[in-house]
Each structure stands twice: as C-alpha cells, then as structure tokens.
Image (spheres, rainbow, N blue to C red):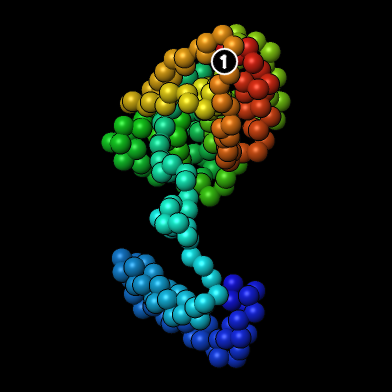
Amino acid sequence: MGRLLGLPYFLSEEALAEQKADAATIRRTRVDLDDSTEGNLAKDLQMVIAQRMQVRFDGHILRRTVESLDWKKEPLVSLPPYEDIMIVVKPTAREMEIISELADGVKERYVVLDFTACCSANLCNSVSASNGLLHVVSRSFYIDHRMSVGFARLDLDEKIPTFQTLEDWEAKKSTKIDTCARMCQHILTRDDAPAISVNDGAIFFPLIPIPALGNTVPRETKILIYQEFPSLGPLLRNVSPAHFHTLYS
C-alpha cells in the first residue's frame, strides 16, 4: 500500500532491508517454538511490525470505523449493527441416504478421522456438519458427498433438472437451496418484513402483514448470496421467487 501511494520510505533500500529482516525474524520464531506457542508469538511480532510501518502513513490515510463521526458529530455510518446468525439445516431422508452412500466411497480414497465433537455439539443430523458426521476429511474440495450436500445425486455428471412445479421440487429438493430461497422470499417481500427466527435448527417465518388496498410497501432491500459451488447457481435461480414465483406462494 505504501508503494502504491508513492511514499518515499516504502520505495527505499531501507524499507526493503527491513522487510527482509522482519520475514527472517518470523521464520526463526516458527522454527524455534513448538506449535502451542508459535502462533501467538508470530501474531504478536506481525502486530509490532505493522504498528512500526503504520507510523510511516501518518498524514496520508483517513481511518474510518463504524463509530466514526462526521463534521456535525453525527454517525458517519447509518447501517444497522452487523449480526451473524448460524443456521443449521437438517437434510431430508433422501439427501442423507445419497450423502452417506457417496461418503462410503470417499472413505476408501481419503484420510478418515473421528469427529465425535460433531455429535457432542448436537450437529449429527445437520447438512453443515456432514463432513464431521460421516468422518470424512479430505484436502480435495469438489468431492462427491460435499457437492451432494448442495444437491443430492449419486452421479455428479447427471444434469440438475429444471423444476417446474412445487411437487417436482419437494420430491428432490435440496434442503440448503430450499432454505435459502424461502429466506429470500420472506426478506424481499417488503423492507419491514418481520425478522426470521431460528430455534434448534428450525426456521420460523412470521406472517407478513398484507398492505391495505391502494397502499404500496417499500422494497429496496438487497441480498448478497455467497455460494461455494458456482455450478449450483442455476439451481438457486431456478427455485428463487423471482424466477419461480409460484413455488413459495
């Protein structure tokens, strides 16, 4: 960043020598200490290095946080507080049967470890904990059973169908995709939609008030969805309320 800004120090031989010395110090720290203490000490060293370089940016960068105020002493950021909600969804019997069958094949090819902590955390029947539940650990990302958590099928070469009716979807639905689509449908109905609640892995969608005749409701809310497997994107769009408006009506 200092080089991009053209700050003289970061373009100097002194900065280059200091950078090499810092890297060597961190390497020695990792070699000399055991795993239990190496992480914390290396992090502390990196913090000291960053704070030393931070002085070089004095007068060049404006720092902004969620608590920053504008010239009127009013909050600079008007967004509501960020809230992280973990939702553990339970697969259907059909999904678990396919995932388990594929996992048996994966176990023959990859390292298998015991994840008893998964069950102690009450995640034994969750899609999110399928790796731990099935005792499968692999460095490979696109392995069969993980892909099937997104949409369960025994053969990944099998084309994912385009669903036309609610009955078709219910017969082969993906729990994760279904949950995501329902959440989108609820949240996008109106900006003041009642908050979704989660209890013991079950999701509850409060009833949304029907606007009075002639009244309009604000619909400015936007949703950003991160999907690990882009190949499942068309499926989510297929069953989303915008494309398949009868599915969740």
Query: Label 1 belongs to which residue?
Result: 215
Going by the numbered disc 1, the residue's amino acid type is Asn
Please determine whether, in this image, residue 122 is positioned above or below residue 20. above
* Quadrant of the drawing holding the N terminus: bottom right
Residue 98 in sight from this viewpoint = no
Which residue appears farthest toward the left when viewing the image? 120
The image quadrant that residue 105 belongs to is top right
Please determine whether, in this image, residue 86 is positioned above or below residue 78. above
Identify the residue at image location x=45%, y=38%.
131
Left or right for 197, reference 160: left
Left or right for 155, reference 41: right
Left or right for 34, reference 242: left
Which of the two residues, 108 or 167, is positioned nearer the viewer here? Answer: 167
Q: Position of residue 51 (x, y in %)?
A: 42, 76
Q: Position of residue 25 (x, y in %)?
A: 43, 82
Badge 1 marks a residue whose secondary structure is loop
Identify the residue at image location x=33%, y=26%.
200
Which of the two residues, 161 or 242, is positioned nearer the viewer here? Answer: 242
Q: Position of residue 182 (x, y in %)?
A: 53, 22
